[in-house]
Amino acid sequence: MERTLFELVGGEEFFLKLVDGFYQGIETDEVLSLMYQGHDLVQARRHLALFLQQYWGGPTTYQSERGHPRLRMRHMPFVINADARDRWLDHMQASLAQLEMPVHAREELWNYLVAAANSLVNSE
Ligand code: HEM
């Protein structure tokens, strides 16, 4: 049987590290830090990590706790323009760069993040 990307990268630990590194970037970002203000960042971290794990073939805890992802709807309260998208992707890229993973898995994950971030732009 083919291994899922979740397994290939080493499971939960990888996604926790990815999200931790990402949020370190968010905390220092003058635009995005304002967007996350007032949010429980422990929960925000957890939800993003659970979502990504589920998407890549890991446990479906996200679905059990949060229901259907409906990401576009959940991001409507935030003004996501091209600048916000690029900043978000920059922090993901910086965090990903710190982590070991097979080249093809890195490409697959990155292409997905770019497409997903593009799909969430909701403002010019
Ligand atoms: C394009 C730029 C993006 C911005 C500015 C952005 C911003 C945010 C903000 C402010 C939150 C609320 C934090 C919280 O309380 O959870 C959030 C939640 C979330 N975001 Fe994003 N996001 C972006 C892209 C993405 C992408 C590409 C994904 C998935 C690949 C994603 C997945 C999520 C998830 C799973 C949640 C938690 C949803 C829930 O409540 O269960 N976001 N995002």
Image: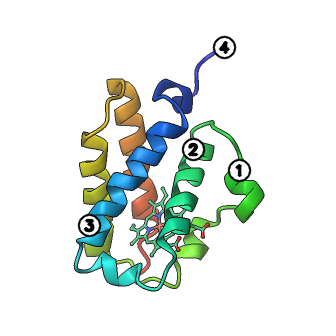
- Quadrant of the image containing the N terminus: top right
**Which residue is at the front of the view, 79 or 18?**
18
Q: Where residue 4 sits in the image (x, y, percent)?
A: 58, 27
Marks 2 and 1: in contact by CB < 8 Å? yes
- Quadrant of the image containing the C terminus: bottom left
- Which one is closest to the eye, mark 4 or mark 2? 2
Classify 10 Å Cα crowding around label 3: few (below 14), some (14-19), many (20 and above): some
Residue on which the image places disc 1: 61
- Which one is closest to the eye, mark 2 or mark 3? 2
- Circle nearer the N terminus (3, 1): 1
Amino acid tagged 4: Met
- Circle nearer the N terminus (4, 1): 4
Q: Residue at x 25, y 74 (%)?
A: 83
Horizontal side of residue 63 vs 113, given as left or right: right
Classify 10 Å Cα crowding around label 1: few (below 14), some (14-19), many (20 and above): some
Residue 117, picture quadrant: bottom left
Instruction: Using the image, tell me which numbered label, if any, was put on residue 87.
Output: 3
Marks 3 and 2: in contact by CB < 8 Å? no
